[in-house]
Image (tube, rainbow, N blue to C red):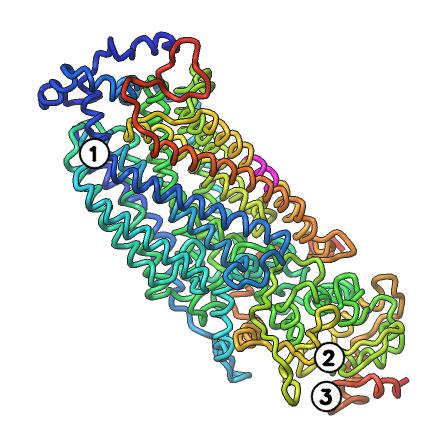
Amino acid sequence: MNRAPLIFLGIFFTLAFSWTGIILTNQLTYGKLEPIVDQTENKSYPEALPGLAAQGKLVYQDLGCIYCHSQQVRRPGFGADDKRGWGDRQSVARDYIREGRVLLGTMRTGPDLRNIGARQASRDWHMLHLYDPQITSKGSIMAPFPFLFETHKIVGQPSPKAIKLPAPYTAVPGYEVVPTPRAEALVAYLQSLKDSYAYPETRNVFVEPASAGKMEDKQ
Amino acid sequence: MSAVDPQDKNPKIEQAGASDESIQQVHSILLREKPEPEENHSPMPLFLLGFISAMVLMVAIYFVHNSGGLSQSFSFKQAAMVYDERFDPKNAPSAGAEVKIDPLALGKKNYASVCAACHQPNGLGVPGVYPPLAKSEWVTGSEERIIRILLHGLQGPIKVEGKEYNSAMPAIGPGGYNFSDERIAAVLTYIRQEWGNSAPAVTKEKVTEIRTKAAAGRTTAWTSAELDAIP
Amino acid sequence: MASVPNLAASFDPATSPDLVKRAELSEIDASTKVPALFFLGSAVLWLLVGTAFALISSFKLHTPNYFGDIEWLTFGRTRTAHLNAVIYGWSVNAAFAVAFWLMARLSRSVLRHSGLLMIAGAFWNIGVTIGIIGILTGDSTSIEWLEMPPYATPLLFVAYALIGAWALITFRFGKSGHIYVSQWYLLAALFWFPWLYSIAQIMLILEPARGTVQALVNWWFAHNVLGLWFTPIGLAAVYYFLPKVLGKPIHSYYLSILGFWSLALFYNWAGVHHLIGGPVPAWVLSAGIAASFMMAIPVIVTGINHHMTMVGSFSALKYSPTLRFIVFGAVSYTITSLIGSLMADRQVNEVVHFTHFTVAHAHQGMYAFFTMVMFGSIYYILPRILLKEWPSAMLISVHFWTVAVGITVYVVGLSIGGIKQGLEMNNADIPFLSTTAASVVTNTIPYLLSRSLSGVLMTIGHMAFAVNISWMLLRPRAPQATTPTLFQNPPEMEVAR
């Protein structure tokens, strides 16, 4: 008896089942999620990435930052994301709808970066950290990115963009270290990363049925 | 079980296989191998059936209890907006429930989030770049000055514990990180009481007072010299 | 249960009752020679390339300034080049070769249209080469498991379309009426992979879905590449070589059926467990977790089936290289899958997610299971298509022990390190990075060093393997009947390999 057609049907339907459940259902239920317009601020959230930051995201992708840094905050109480200050609330799907490529990541060899723009706004810090993480974060195992910088001979006025390297990292006297446009873009992207807005769905969290009474008991 | 016997269908191979002695030598590797695999029909052990039934039951219960509202509302559209598997639409949290937060815990969290990148988790800073906070006279000294530094930032050279530093610190208050007065007070209370520091707590009201009265209208970062003039 | 001496006697060439079937097999094997050699050769080259990138990446993670100023060797790129070289280079090429050889033998039909396969193989390998160069020069898409830039993927598509067409033709012309369990797995894998790959390409790169639907597509794809492509091909090989080498039937046809269909039903829902805690609907995650738990069924069923087949023949592990690699792989499959089910539990996942534990787990699946099974298969297939013996039993032994010890050190070290990392990461009192106190990052470094050590061991093994293969290819065929290259000669001349 040739059971090939039956086997074939079976292998077709099993994959069709998960494709429908995981992909099609979710594409239909929230694949067209819209930004929320806040009337009081007259702004829509999430905000679009500024142009330079969008270029920086491409640098983030091409250097493979995603393999050590996640961009998703777990809810308070699940892991220590909130206690470490990586974000106050669970990341929700709407946070990502403006992103052409979603870079959630699955590793935290380094810290989560979903709110790095809110946590570290300083351009100078990011520049030093990218040039050599050992300057700002001794003991870090992050790769240095010296190739995002150029060492120039100072001609006339020193460049205002040059980074201020501490000893022993300082350039040879008469030279300065200047970020390339890629470094500027990458830092702009990092500075833009923040999920500040509290969408209605961020309140869909679990509460103990008799929460008020129980919380007082604990304290 | 093979349904077709090759001997009926392929006499050429039969001849080749049976007659040519040299094939036996060259193909000794093939000839020594064992027959093509077959299957026995040993019955399935009974305990497997029990195990599978138990798994199905357990997993079904698990899903119903952790469906993030799906098993209560039966609406995929609503359930798509739920990220907490224990969420129950009947017990949605009320909006007004304010939770009292310990300022030290709030301060620690915000310090870890924002400040530790430069001043380090141990408060020792980075030699030559970012000044230490542990045992720093600026941190444990006048709250007037340190509140101003957080509100508007600091620029230019500054001497901490006898060493010179020259990096810019961004404003943590309005226009910079936009911390609320409560968060600023919490961070200050934390750094004034951590790493062996023991200075009094900073209140939210004191921060508000400096922001709205004593330093009202200020938008630029402070310098060390300006702060020295403040008690 | 037949004992080893009996089996040996029953297959003595002089008394063999099924000489004709052997002649037929010999014709089939000969027809697979050129494409199988081509795919296996490419696979081994990619294995060496992938190993080199693995070592560089591993060193860079504890010594970040090693090659720190060379842009194309930055960690984010070498790690990605490693993944793509070992997955699309080594594993897929090896899987193709083993799948073709098994398909041809099991459907008892000579391999037709091998030209089609050669063209497909050329497209595939050129595509992978371009893709990896693209990754190294900065065109990575940063979509996990799909990093190859869009200009490389059409080549892979063409290759796969040709292979799919070929597989259908071969199956269609098969002579064997009975469909052996390995064939179910092969058929399913060859059908599932293009579906997964094209949906992923469409919904992630051509017409990207909005927001985190992308993440669902990504992990539906990436996990299913393991579960619905590599796993079925690995299991097909185990189901073929275990009974083949032992000369015994598979324990139970019913268990085979149950194992196959439960895998088909549950595995493809499991992938979303990579997103636990993330911004995707909780119900999808719970469904994925439920499916991951249910994966215990096919794994235990398949494990019992393999184990019961082995029972009584464990002594053969002393002699047969193929069997030793295959059994190592099959045991790893059971262990790694059960750990995988456990990892999907939310409480466990809360700790191990985002840590090196997941890296250990991925290598346990792809290496300790799949790659070991492929090694075992190659040790069986090559002598049959080349009609030569392996030149050195010593090199096979070096290969086995270095990679077996290497992957064990790798998995154990990174698993312990990963659990520690996860527990510390979830305790906000321990700083993430600090030079003066114990911190999450600095505490992982000893485990990252153990990984580099295991990497060196595995590299030695891969070199021994490559040397043995090259030697085999270069040396002339023996004019008279030969004896198999075994780890040691059994008391009676053992026939299995």
Q: Residues within 10 Å of mark 1 (few under 14, many from 20)?
A: many
Cα–Cα span, label 2 and label 3: 12 Å
Front label number (2 vs 3): 2
Residue in the image at 40% along x and 22% along y: C485
Q: Quadrant of residue C231?
A: top left
**Is residue C475 highlighted in magenta?**
no
Q: Quadrant of residue C96?
A: top left
Residue in the image at 29% along x and 11% along y: C12
**Residue B80 picture location, percent across and down:** 44, 60
- Image position of C165 (left or right of B122): left
Residue in the image at 74% along x and 78% along y: B167
Cα–Cα span, label 1 and label 3: 80 Å
**Residue C174 picture location, percent across and down:** 17, 33
Specify the subunit that label 2 lies on.
B
**Label 2 secondary element:** loop
Residue B90 in view (yes/no): no
Which residue position is annotated with label 1? C31
Q: Quadrant of the N terminus of chain A?
A: top left
Span colored in magenta: C408-415
Which residue position is annotated with label 3? B220
Which residue position is annotated with label 2? B168
Q: Residues within 10 Å of mark 2 (few under 14, many from 20)?
A: some
- Number of numbered discs: 3
Query: Residues at marks 1 and 2, common chain?
Result: no
**Label 1 secondary element:** helix
Mark 1 is on which residue type? Ser
> Which of C211 and B106 lies nearest the eye of the viewer?
C211
Query: Residues at marks 2 and 3, common chain?
Result: yes
